[in-house]
């Protein structure tokens, strides 16, 4: 069976295990059904997620010009503390920025390779944790806009990491920790503007990924260097496909690549 289209991050449904879907313009593929089967990935062309043109992908699935123009790639995406829509101040497109920034946001702790702090829109829970390959997570605060979430994250980064080791996450060299204790320990470090939004009484969320076999080491598939790859799919975690030969393929890291995927 051949599926063809431009890569976007896999859509997910939380379950036991999590279900993963590659969604193309005219078709979709439940990747869980490809586990233990031979999968072939062929790079065909680039296709910018914003303009749709066949241009080399620069970052985040966008060609270079779109990356510096589209509001979906503003600096506040990666650095929520730079959000300004609550001040009625435009970065690239105020209407878009108000739509995204002026809605409830969660500051959370997630454990994928280690305990890390992060920010996401409330509507993206638990999707954001799944995308990061976190096997456990917990909300710390729920605030009404992205700016408050951003300054809270900046404050908490003084005490806990905001990075994930993707290699450690994919080899499953992880340990369970008590995130409730971590949440309570960090309470005193929350900025004054966000203290009223602290969540007192929630528990951890645990996530189960569809992985049959974890690799000892990982080697990342680069479609620019290896435009055709074939391997037996052994797992899916975060936004990565894990193959029997220890090759891993980051779907989100290859957004904007138009590919053919065959289940052999």
Image: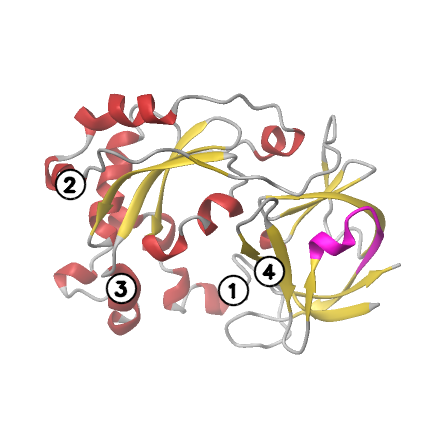
Residue 201 part of the magenta-drawn span = no
Residue occupying the point 66% across, 78% down: 26
Q: Is residue 136 above or below residue 98?
A: above
Q: Which residue is mark 1?
A: 64
Residue 208, quarter of picture = top right
Q: Which residues are magenta?
A: 31-41
Q: Which residue is mark 4?
A: 255
Q: Secondary structure at mark 3?
A: loop
Q: How far apart are the two marked residues, 1 and 3, measured between alpha carbons? A: 18 Å
Residue occupying the point 70% across, 52% down: 32
Q: How far apart are the two marked residues, 2 and 4, measured between alpha carbons? A: 34 Å
Indicate the quadrant containing the N terminus: top left, top right, bottom left or bottom right. Answer: bottom right
Q: Are circles 1 and 3 on residues that touch, CB within 8 Å? A: no
* Comparing labels 4 and 3, the label whose residue is closer to the camera: 4
Pick the residue in front: 167 or 242: 242
Residue count near mark 1 (Cα–Cα under 10 Å), binned few <14, some 14–19, many ≥20? some
Q: Which residue is mark 2?
A: 194
Q: Secondary structure at mark 1?
A: helix
Q: How far apart are the two marked residues, 2 and 3, measured between alpha carbons? A: 24 Å
* Comparing labels 2 and 3, the label whose residue is closer to the camera: 2
Mark toward the start of the polypeptide (4 vs 1): 1
* Comparing labels 1 and 2, the label whose residue is closer to the camera: 2
Residue count near mark 4 (Cα–Cα under 10 Å), binned few <14, some 14–19, many ≥20? many
- Residue 91 is marked as 3
Mark toward the start of the polypeptide (2 vs 4): 2
Residue occupying the point 77% across, 54% down: 34
* Comparing labels 2 and 4, the label whose residue is closer to the camera: 2
* Comparing labels 1 and 3, the label whose residue is closer to the camera: 3
Q: Secondary structure at mark 4?
A: loop
In the image, residue 54 lies at what x, y percent? 64, 74
Q: Are circles 1 and 2 on residues that touch, CB within 8 Å? A: no
């Amino acid at each position: 069976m051949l599926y063809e289209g431009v890569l976007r991050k896999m859509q997910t449904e939380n379950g036991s295990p999590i279900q993963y879907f590659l969604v193309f313009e005219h078709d979709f593929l439940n990747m869980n059904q490809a586990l233990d089967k031979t999968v072939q990935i062929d790079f065909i062309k680039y296709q910018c997620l914003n303009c749709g043109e066949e241009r080399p992908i620069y970052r985040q699935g966008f060609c270079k010009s779109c990356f510096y123009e589209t509001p979906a790639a503003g600096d506040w995406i990666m650095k929520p503390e730079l959000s300004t829509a609550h001040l009625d101040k435009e970065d690239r497109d105020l209407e878009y920025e108000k739509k995204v920034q002026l809605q409830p946001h969660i500051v959370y702790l997630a454990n994928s390779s280690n305990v890390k702090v992060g920010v996401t829109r409330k509507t993206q829970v638990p999707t954001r944790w799944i995308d990061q390959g976190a096997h456990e997570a917990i909300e710390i605060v729920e605030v009404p806009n992205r700016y408050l979430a951003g300054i809270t994250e900046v404050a908490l980064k003084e005490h806990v990491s905001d990075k994930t080791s993707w290699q450690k996450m994919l080899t499953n060299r992880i340990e369970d920790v008590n995130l409730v204790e971590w949440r309570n320990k960090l309470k005193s470090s929350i900025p004054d503007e966000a203290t009223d939004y602290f969540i007192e009484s929630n528990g951890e969320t645990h996530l189960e990924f569809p992985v049959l076999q974890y690799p000892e080491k990982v080697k990342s598939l680069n479609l620019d260097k290896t435009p055709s790859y074939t391997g037996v799919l052994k797992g899916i975690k975060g936004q990565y496909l894990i193959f029997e030969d220890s090759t891993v393929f980051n779907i989100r890291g290859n957004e904007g690549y138009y590919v053919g995927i065959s289940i052999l």
